[in-house]
Amino acid sequence: MKTEFSFADKNILIVEDQKPFQVMLKGMLKNMGARNVVVSPNGEQALVRCNEEKFDVIFIDYNLGDGRNGRQLFEELKERKLLPVHNVSMLVTGESELNMVIGAVEVRPDDYVVKPFSQNLLKQRVSRTWLKKQTLLPLLMYLDRDQLDKALIQVDELSKTAPRLRTLILKYKADILFKLGKFQELEAFLDQVLKVKSLNWALVYKSKLMRSKGKHSLAIKYSKEALSLSKLTIEAYDIIADCYLQNSETKPAYDWIRSGIEKSPFSVQRQYKLSSIAKLNKDYDVSIKACNQVVELTSKSFRRDQKHLLNHIRNIIDICELEQDVNKKRKYNQEAIYALQKSKHEQHVNAALKIEDFEQICMARLDSVNGLNYQAKRSFFELSAKFTNRKIDLPSNLLPDSVSLMLKIGEYEKAKEYAQKVEMVKDDLDDFAIEMIARARENAGENIDLVKTLNKKGIEDYHKGELHNSLKYFEQALNIAPMNSGTALNLIQVLISLIESEPRSRWQLIDRCRFIFKIIDGMPLAQANNQRAMSLAEKFNTLVTEPKK
């Protein structure tokens, strides 16, 4: 193994958009013996170069002008496995602000340097990092191939042969044990490490372990201990927020996730978590801003995906449903429409969903929010018919909205049908969409049970001949679930019986019956309900046309 580092035999890439710094850094490297130095002015060209050849050392400036920034480029290079295992990748930033530095460190480059820096400092940092990677190379190769069991054996070997890197090697061991799910062994290992010294990374793994066991109070305790050692242990903020949330303590969860965001706002996952927790705390503007921030963060990165834009719009509509203040509801309604209009101008390569279809279901959801349930239902089933007529399934990206809308208007059987389809395509949906469905089902849970109970009582009284009591129960059920087809048919059946038995109220009852028929008119029904609807319509038409007795 080499014990000295030399730039002379290294293939080096500089990714930098500013010409003066390109010249300066290239000059430094040449002065230190570098012979093969390539410069790319932006992330796109850097990706092409890394696809074509392997670089031993890469310097990536954090700010690269338009297009990907350095953090996003580094993430993509790692994701696409365009960095050799032995490679040293360094992020270079001119920003000394804490959140910029943490944002750079959080994606785990091999090292980072803050401008301006001396030639001597650069040589020390690159040399140290290179030699460290050379020592760890056997372990890194196993990790690169996802051979965790072999990596675990290698960790134990390295702990004997590389005592100077002991702390780092121990951290690798904790990570491997956690990924392998060897929690009992991990706990014993962490307790042994912490007995010798309180290390913030060990406390974080202890916290993650407690969280996985559902011991949220202990997880919070260990994460807070880690933060007492270093306020920059960002993962600890996420764990604490998540554990408070699991304990239904939404206010402290909100305080902790905001503290994490303040220190490192560039994580997509953290912004989504902030949006979700802010919504639970009824801080709707922050929730919308966080989801929009996800769209901004991913707009120029390889993580750019139509789903983030869809989630942003869904989130605004969710908030429209939750907001009680009429003026604020109107504001969010307009914001959702504006976001939908803006989305039409967004270009998404290989988009899984036509934005026009998504727009139609979103407008249906907004109609329902505004009390236009009949219009919402008709609009949705017109959209659904487009796919049914072509004998193809509703796109998976429309299923969360379908479940949410059907639950909102009270079409519980349809909601159940779409929820079953969700189970079959769950892998196509992200956490936001899955959570959206779970939240909609949870919110509708009591209503579903209540409507079922009211229908049951209505049916029982109908069979007893107590028509007015029956009518009352079905009306109450329909008030809760305004577009429920089963309840509508039950109500029509009672109204027809009342038309027959109470001629004095004939025309009032007929008008009410006609209104209820609109709920099912032209809508797809289950076969049994469809036959029942046809039978009731025939009987109603006969009553309406026959001469009054």
Image (cartoon, helix red, strand yellow):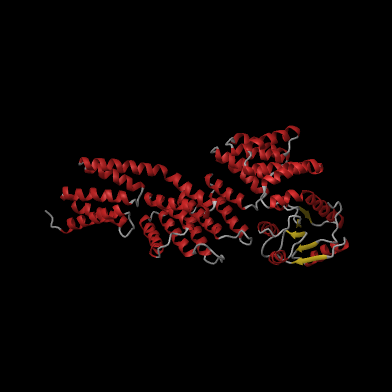
Q: Residue at x 45, y 44 (%)?
A: 442
Can residue 106 be seen at all in this image of the molecule?
no
Q: Position of residue 304 (x, y in %)?
A: 60, 60
Query: Furthest-top residue in view?
Result: 195
Residue 25 occupies quadrant: bottom right
The image shows residue 143, relative to residue 295, as above or below, that is: above
Please indicate whether residue 300 sits to the left or right of residue 11 in the image.
Answer: left
Q: Position of residue 418 (x, y in %)?
A: 42, 53
Q: Position of residue 508 (x, y in %)?
A: 22, 52
Can residue 119 be seen at all in this image of the molecule?
yes
Q: Position of residue 504 (x, y in %)?
A: 16, 50
Residue 233 occupies quadrant: top right
Q: Residue at x 21, y 51 (%)?
A: 496
Please indicate whether residue 378 sits to the left or right of residue 425 in the image.
Answer: left
Please indicate whether residue 547 sits to the left or right of residue 87 in the image.
Answer: left
Residue closer to the observer: 84 or 501: 84
